[in-house]
Amino acid sequence: MKKPQRDVTLRFLAEPQDVNFGGKVHGGAVMKWIDLAAYACAAGWSGRYCVTAYAGGIRFVAPIHVGSLVEVAAKVIYTGSSSMHIALEVNACDPKSLNRRLTTHCIVIMVAVDETGHKIEIPKWIPESEADKKQHQSALKLMEMRKQISDEMQIYLEEE
């Protein structure tokens, strides 16, 4: 069996239809690109169709201008039985200078599903390098934080 692909980078130019009323690429377009890269990464790792279960910690650091070369890098940092935690980083630059700058980063959790939409087992990712181990530990901490946030959010889901 072929080794699963742990990471992927999508590259393209930001187009005029991606712009908001302020003249910069709007957050919704960036979030769409993040979801596409997360899917490509998760599908490459699992060899299966995957769905988005969570997107969080989205931090918009700097604007993206029309005509910028955009790179969306996605990497598996943790796997469960059917889920993959994907760390994403969006960088942009003028294609003439190639002086990249971070614009956005976040975590997306994708779940592999079968033809009927039920969760399906995926290959386990085992961290090897020190950087991998730090990312893995970070994913575990984020899992605990998400649980705490979910518990706190219950107040908004209760009926009055």
Image: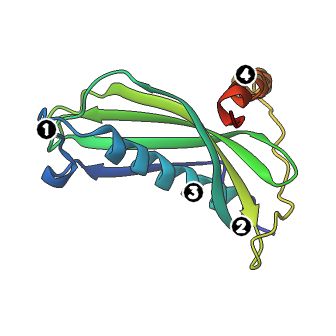
Q: Which of marks 2 and 3 is in front?
A: 3
68 or 23: nearer the viewer? 23
Q: Is there a contact, CB below 8 Å, between mark 4 and mark 3?
A: no
Q: Which of marks 2 and 4 is nearer the N terminus?
A: 2
Question: Distance of mark 2 from mark 4, alpha carbons?
Answer: 35 Å
Q: Which mark is residue 39?
A: 3
Q: Residue 88 carries which label?
A: none
| Residue under the image location 17 percent in, 31 percent down | 97
Q: Is there a contact, CB below 8 Å, between mark 2 and mark 3?
A: no
Question: Distance of mark 4 from mark 1, alpha carbons?
Answer: 34 Å
SS at mark 4 in the image: helix
Question: Distance of mark 4 from mark 3, alpha carbons?
Answer: 28 Å
Q: Which mark is residue 21?
A: 1
41 or 30: nearer the viewer? 30
SS at mark 2 in the image: loop
Could you tell whether 116 is left or right of 98 in the image? right
Percent of width and height locating residue 5 = 66, 55
Could you tell whether 8 is left or right of 123 in the image? left
| Residue under the image location 73 percent in, 30 percent down | 154
Q: Earlier in the sequence, mark 1 or mark 3?
A: 1
Question: Distance of mark 1 from mark 3, alpha carbons?
Answer: 29 Å
The correct choice, above or below, for 140 with respect to 33 in the image is: above
| Residue under the image location 41 percent in, 29 percent down | 104
Question: Distance of mark 2 from mark 3, alpha carbons?
Answer: 11 Å
Q: Residue 152 carries which label?
A: 4
Percent of width and height locating residue 25 = 23, 40
- Residue designated by label 2: 47
Q: Earlier in the sequence, mark 4 or mark 1?
A: 1
